[in-house]
Amino acid sequence: MRALRSLLLLIALCAATVVLVISVGGQSGRPVELIVTGGTVVTMNRGGLVIPDGAVAIDGGVIMAVGPADEVARQFSAKERIDVRGQVVLPGLINTHTHAPMVLFRGLADDFTLEEWLTKYIFPAEARTVSPEFVRIGTQLAALEMIESGTTTFADMYYFEDDIAEATKKSGLRAVLGQSVIKFPVKDAKTPEEALTRAEAFITKWQRDPTITPAVAPHAPTTVEPGTLKAARALANKYSVPLLIHLAETRDEVKAVQAARGATPTQYLESLGLWEGRSLAAHAVWLDDADMKILARRKVGVAHNPESNMKLASGIAAVPKWIAQGMLAGLGTDGAASNNDLDMFEAMRFAALLHKVGTMNPQAMPAQQALELATRRGAEALGLGDQIGSLEAGKQADLITVAMDGARQTPMFSPASHLVYVTRGDDVRTTIVAGKVLMRDRQVLTMDRQAVLNEARQMADQVRAALQAPDGKGK
Amino acid sequence: MRALRSLLLLIALCAATVVLVISVGGQSGRPVELIVTGGTVVTMNRGGLVIPDGAVAIDGGVIMAVGPADEVARQFSAKERIDVRGQVVLPGLINTHTHAPMVLFRGLADDFTLEEWLTKYIFPAEARTVSPEFVRIGTQLAALEMIESGTTTFADMYYFEDDIAEATKKSGLRAVLGQSVIKFPVKDAKTPEEALTRAEAFITKWQRDPTITPAVAPHAPTTVEPGTLKAARALANKYSVPLLIHLAETRDEVKAVQAARGATPTQYLESLGLWEGRSLAAHAVWLDDADMKILARRKVGVAHNPESNMKLASGIAAVPKWIAQGMLAGLGTDGAASNNDLDMFEAMRFAALLHKVGTMNPQAMPAQQALELATRRGAEALGLGDQIGSLEAGKQADLITVAMDGARQTPMFSPASHLVYVTRGDDVRTTIVAGKVLMRDRQVLTMDRQAVLNEARQMADQVRAALQAPDGKGK
């Protein structure tokens, strides 16, 4: 499946190159569906190429060319043009870890200890409200927020993942979606065996979808038994899909695994063969050097969630060291219940500032590196590095345009600095996934914004009622 | 001067109370200039009062009443009403430390060591470009950004402070403005003596202004000689105005003062009598317990700047401990060159998350406390606690209204949580200072927005040119 995709991509890339060569000097260029033109194109390719007054030509969902606007105009004629003069054009942002429907719990309970937060609020709320309807409404809201803030791809771990996939598909976003497997009875599975069966059905249903990558998501080393972990790995490998898992989020988790298994979480999972296949681990706040070597060698994508780690006081992940050791690091927001939003610009800003103070080195994570985490490196962490993460001919046309004329963005000396240190998701003007315009001039085109917000508010009333009910355990 | 202000305030407060009592039951209420009505009023008073569907009546620049909308409507009739249904009404935010004109250097040079940043970029840029014209244009831009993001009062330390005061006055913002005194020759003074003379002229010119509080700002314990520090204190006390100073920002500063003076910066300044009078110290990242006791006893306002401290890798200030020890803590952005914006919502969010991970305690700085730092506590840190910082009858009418209907703010369980964890300056809809509407429906009324941005961009071209000139020392 992936080999086929890579081959098709290579063919597209060659075709694009040939077209570029052939069409040079031609009077009217080759017709393409869409040209985004006139902005400063921050390609995020390996050379860090930035093209002032650049353009991106798009056809069949794929980037046909990236270059100076006048050159692209000579080579291609577009059915549709989006003029983004004064804006920055950037690859769509990649959120490598979230729980989309948890937007419905945002701000429900903050500033508690993790234990109190989970047992008094989140678990009771989930036990009473999570349903296919709940995840559909929550995913809609999350998708709206992501489209509005420039995220084009997200990785998710939650329940009723098939319903999440349906809602995601309608929104137009690209996603890696992991059906949760956990040892406790949950709303979509009474046992881990049932969850694995559900996961297999989910994977077989979606495995050929061009924008949805189905996955299996054993919750964490402490909440899934070793046999189930092995079965999840086998399932993922059977269909060549990723396995998603939480890893070493807190010091307590590391202590618990050390006590029960005599090894760090990473090394315990290595002993089970869990990393032998495409994997994405979230958090990894508490790793030792041997853990990092394993994750680098096994090419495990690792999602860093600075805001969640700060808010829950989990700790500061050694991300600059991860990168130095060759780990595939990406950036995420985590669920909105512990962030409390899905804005990847905020995630970049928090990452860039946190690691400077965390290492007492103001050069620890330059703006450009934070941008890489949210784009190219994030794509690589998801195993999608050949398809997304940079603006290059042959890749999927996932891109955003960002306004740069606000008072807080004036004056402008460096696009990378402004993107990381002063830009918000609200500055995004256009969001495009696989060549499809999901938002234009801040109008979301794939969803009825007001209906999504109304449904979310009604569902929140149910959450409130559930927590206030006699057995809701809430205050 | 302050005693007179307090007396007037007390009279106004009594009058307001009497009016409230008298007008109850009246058919048409007492006429006032403005009523802001229909929002959720987060008063930030000591009791933490929140009034759903509340209103604020304003007359003569002063808050006449705060209460349920229907009650206020019975008691007052307004010349002008601003309906803010669905929004939150909050005291204007108070930025206790910035260098307003440095917005013109934002993003000019990031991700350098402090030494390299200062010597290669900021100092050469300042030496070549800082002028009355520069600070006027920079202050305009900063004021525009602050009005647009809900800051109503700021404390400033820079050069040509009289020109900063003129620009601030025109913008309508309230400010505590400190004329810098430093031992090196700078653009507005060849010697510290000249700077002190300039500071005295500045203070006498502005001391009776209702919204501008002039101040003297000796730069830092390492950059001002002891004699000058004493003279600055004497000058401040002569006119009963504040003294502003940087304090214990980096470990290196503490080491240098220890080596040169045999004491911590705080204790060295205590030995000079520097804290004997109204004082505001910025940063205080590196304090020991004795330092904290001194600052608490001397009632020194202390400005915490989480983003700058993170970006420059200065360290994590012990703010929860400050508060526990009774220090007058406020929140600031620092100059935009080290932040890179002046958004106090971001400052709250960074403070709330930083101290959780910094202490490994998710309850270290609850949302409500971050809000207090940006409002009531900030006012107290500036010595303006009797005038601003909360929405209470008798206080100055400095308030903002904040939209709460964005996707990332949906659903809404708690205003305090949303204000700190998901709100941005861009969500502010109305900004009012001393009863004057500076921004309404995001239209800034006191400035020509486009002209301000254009002037700033032209000045940035000069900064760029100065750094590229043969002796500019920039790359």
Image (cartoon, coloured by chain):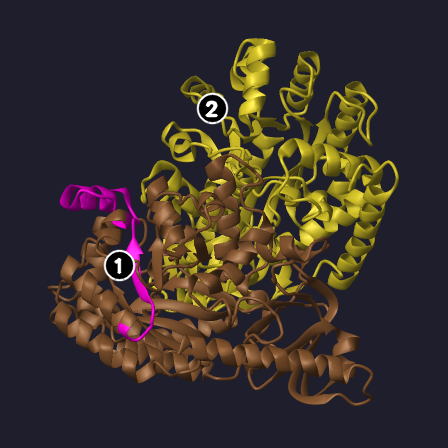
Chain colours: A yellow, B brown
Q: Residue B186 occupies which quadrant of the picture?
A: bottom left
Q: Which corner quadrant holds the N terminus of chain B?
A: bottom left
Residue B383 is tagged as: none
Q: Along the line of sight, which residue is nearer the eye, A82 or B384?
A: B384
Assess disc 2: are there few (<14), some (14-19) or many (≥20) residues with their C-alpha within 10 Å of its C-alpha. Answer: many
Q: Is residue B261 within the magenta segment? A: yes
The amino acid on which the numbered mark 1 sits, given as a three-letter code, is Leu
**Residue under the point 43% across and 61% down:** B381
Q: Is residue A158 part of the magenta span, yes or no? A: no
Q: Mark 2 lies on which chain?
A: A
Residue at label 1? Answer: B274
Q: What is the secondary structure assignment of the residue under circle 2? A: loop
Closest to the observer, A66 or A112: A112
Instruction: Work out whether A428 lies above or below A304.
Output: below
Say whether marks 1 and 2 touch (CB < 8 Å).
no
In which quadrant will I find the C terminus of chain B? Answer: bottom left
Q: Is residue A149 above or below residue B75?
A: above
Q: Where is residue B163 in the image (x, y as percent from the top left)?
A: 30, 80
Q: Specify the segment rendered in magenta.
A: B238-266
| Within-10-Å neighbours for mark 1: few <14, some 14–19, many 20+ | many
Give the residue number, with chain letter if any, for mark 2: A287
